[in-house]
Image (tube, helix red, strand yellow):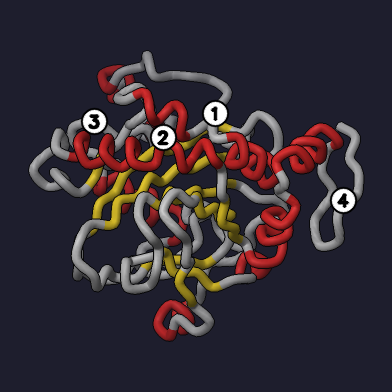
């Protein structure tokens, strides 16, 4: 696909996407992504449905199992019409395509609810399932939909701008010191988008009320198997070499989210993490 050099500080993109950037006024957002690894999107389509989105997450979280009731709502597409609107906000799709290219895929749609207190989410890169160094191109990106104001006191996302350029997981000393970290400050209705390489976490909420967020993750087209062997059951696997279970990803956490749990299988998640980073982690 033909590309053209665009504004200073932004990599080359296709003429088609460049025209969408002109129409939607996204050049500053693109520069933010290149220079800082994240940006804050303001789109009328997002602001129009924020209250509806918040209500749907809170309502559906009540159908999760006892462990996650009132805390998580997963596998959201199709459970309320608002989620189909949320994943197709024009500015979000254009900027995600800027990071991941045409044909990107929806990877996860998860609602989370946090009240006051609790610990911070540890500093990490979303490329958790890949060893370092990360490739020069982005593997994935995450959008965090703000359904009430984001400030440090409200439990906003923590981020260290520019760390996406290092193309590695955050080292232990930075995960401990959080040097350079700051809160993403954004008004209600904003969508905070970051690439999979930037280091981020979150702050504990210090104010009354609930931090309700929709997490939307996109990934590149090529990050999936070509063949689908889901028709081969456990009985078939037991009759064949044990290595086949691993080759088919049967013990990985991908595709393990259910409406009842509201989250992925946590034991499988830990197993997947250990496969990538070893028994001791990174």
Q: Position of residue 253 (x, y in %)?
A: 35, 41
Q: CA distance from mark 1 to mark 2?
A: 10 Å
Q: Is residue 152 toward the left or the right of residue 97 in the image?
A: left
Between discs 1 and 3, the one toward the N terminus: 1
SS category of the residue bearing label 3: loop
Q: What residue is disc 1 on?
A: 225
Q: What residue is disc 2 on?
A: 249
SS category of the residue bearing label 4: loop
SS category of the residue bearing label 2: loop
- Of 279 and 35, nearer the camera is 35
Q: What residue is disc 4 on?
A: 6
Residue 196 shows in this picture: no
Name above or below for residue 70 compared with residue 243.
Answer: below
Where's the N terminus, which quadrant? top right
Where's the C terminus, which quadrant? bottom left
Q: What residue is disc 3 on?
A: 259
Mark 2: few/some/many CA within 10 Å (<14, 14-19, 20+): few
Mark 4: few/some/many CA within 10 Å (<14, 14-19, 20+): some
Between discs 1 and 2, the one toward the N terminus: 1
Task: Give residue 174's mark.
Answer: none
Q: CA distance from mark 4 to mark 1?
A: 34 Å
């Amino acid at each position: 696909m033909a590309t053209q050099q665009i504004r200073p500080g932004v990599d080359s993109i296709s003429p088609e996407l460049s025209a969408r950037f002109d129409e939607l006024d996204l050049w500053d957002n693109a520069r933010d992504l290149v220079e800082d690894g994240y940006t804050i999107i303001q789109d009328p389509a997002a602001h129009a449905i924020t209250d509806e989105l918040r209500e749907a997450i809170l309502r559906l979280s009540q159908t999760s199992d006892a462990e996650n009731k009132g805390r998580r709502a997963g596998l959201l597409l199709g459970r309320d019409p608002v989620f189909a609107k949320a994943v197709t906000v024009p500015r979000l799709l254009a900027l995600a395509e800027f990071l991941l290219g045409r044909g990107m895929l929806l990877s996860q749609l998860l609602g989370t609810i946090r009240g006051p207190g609790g610990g911070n989410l540890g500093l990490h890169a979303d490329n958790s399932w890949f060893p370092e160094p990360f490739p020069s191109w982005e593997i994935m990106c995450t959008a965090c939909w703000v359904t009430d104001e984001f400030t440090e006191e409200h439990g906003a996302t923590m981020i260290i701008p520019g760390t996406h350029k290092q193309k590695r997981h955050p080292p232990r000393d930075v995960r401990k010191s959080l040097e350079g970290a700051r809160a993403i400050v954004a008004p209600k209705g904003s969508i905070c988008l970051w690439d999979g390489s930037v280091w981020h976490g979150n702050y504990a909420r210090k104010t009354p009320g609930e931090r309700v967020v929709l997490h939307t993750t996109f990934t590149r087209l090529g990050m999936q198997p070509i063949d689908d062997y889901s028709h081969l059951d456990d009985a078939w696997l037991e009759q064949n070499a044990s290595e086949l279970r691993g080759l088919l990803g049967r013990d990985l956490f991908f595709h393990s989210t259910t409406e009842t749990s509201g989250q992925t299988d946590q034991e499988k998640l830990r197993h997947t993490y250990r496969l990538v980073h070893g028994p001791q982690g990174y």
